[in-house]
Image (spheres, rainbow, N blue to C red):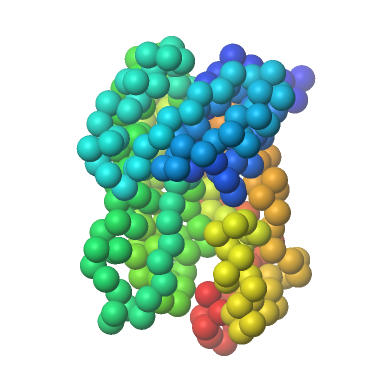
Amino acid sequence: MILDLFKLDGRVALVTGASRGLGQSMALGLAEAGADIVAVSRSGDCQEIEALVLETGRRFWSYTCDLGQPTQRVGLIDRILDQTGAIDILVNNAGVGHRHLPEEYPLTEWCQLLEIHLNASFDLSQQAVTHMLYRGRGKIINIGSVMTFQGGLNIPAYAAAKHGLAGLTKSLANSWSNRGINVNCICPGYFETSLSHGLQDDPVRGPQILDRIPVGRWGQPDEIAGLCVFLASDASNYMHGSTVVIDGGWMSRWPDCEQQRCL
């Protein structure tokens, strides 16, 4: 049966940035599909997602780690494996955002953002794949953005990191696809989360962005869960190195815009 291909029973999924927003929605979706969940977050405030996962009958583990600090990432996967015994799915979702004029962008914030979005994604993938290669299977899902394809306004570090994730996804897929590892990238558009409220409520940029989304609304966090489950499941076994957009049609319409001032 086709639906059986989407089942994740008996698998363990590690989701970074799982305490809120899109990370929380993807973690819950994976649990509803049958996976046990490992949540990694900087705050360690995972009570909400823990309760939601436990309601599905799945197991849950939480780890506090500032992924922007390389020393905190050392041995993280081994510590998780000591408890879970396996990591079948890795979702590199954790991220931050800073907005400054490029000529004023602080180099410290540039380095921090690339460390979290790009370096940590490679680091955790490298740590996890040793285990995955030994077992001959695994799913790695990087979380990009529509800024994987665009430059945006006053977000040079974010755009650079998301472009980098697309290249990383393709490169890792080239190396690992014939060894049982799927590496793909989800590129969300504008979703309603606690991190996006400032942009959504902005009296100028909020309406500009909304006007350019063909579906006429921002995405709801739970609308990304199905795509994550698909890429984590056997239904996507022939997908390697793909960057999949989920954006309400934003990328379809964007070339018709006169300017990028809304980004």
The quadrant in which residue 225 appears is: top right
Question: Which residue is at the front of the view, 224 or 238?
Answer: 224
Image x and y of residue 153, in percent: 45, 77
When asked about the image quadrant of residue 235, the answer is: top right
119 left or right, relative to 97 = left
Classify the position of the N terminus by image quarter. top right
Query: Residue shown at 61%/65% (left/top)?
Result: 197
Q: Is residue 240 left or right of residue 161?
A: right
Residue lying at 65% horizontally and 59% vertically, measured from the top left: 192
Point out residue 118 in the picture as x, y percentages from the top left corner: 34, 50
Residue 175 visible in rendering: no
Q: Where 209 sits versus 169, above or below?
A: below
Q: Residue at x 37, y 37 (%)?
A: 65
Task: Pinpoint residue 193: horizontal percent, then vertical percent.
Answer: 62, 56
- Residue at 30% from the left image edge and 74% from the top image edge: 105
Count how many numbered circles sit on residues in the image: 0
**In the rendered image, is residue 161 in sight?**
yes
Name the spot of residue 122 as percent of width and height, x first: 32, 41
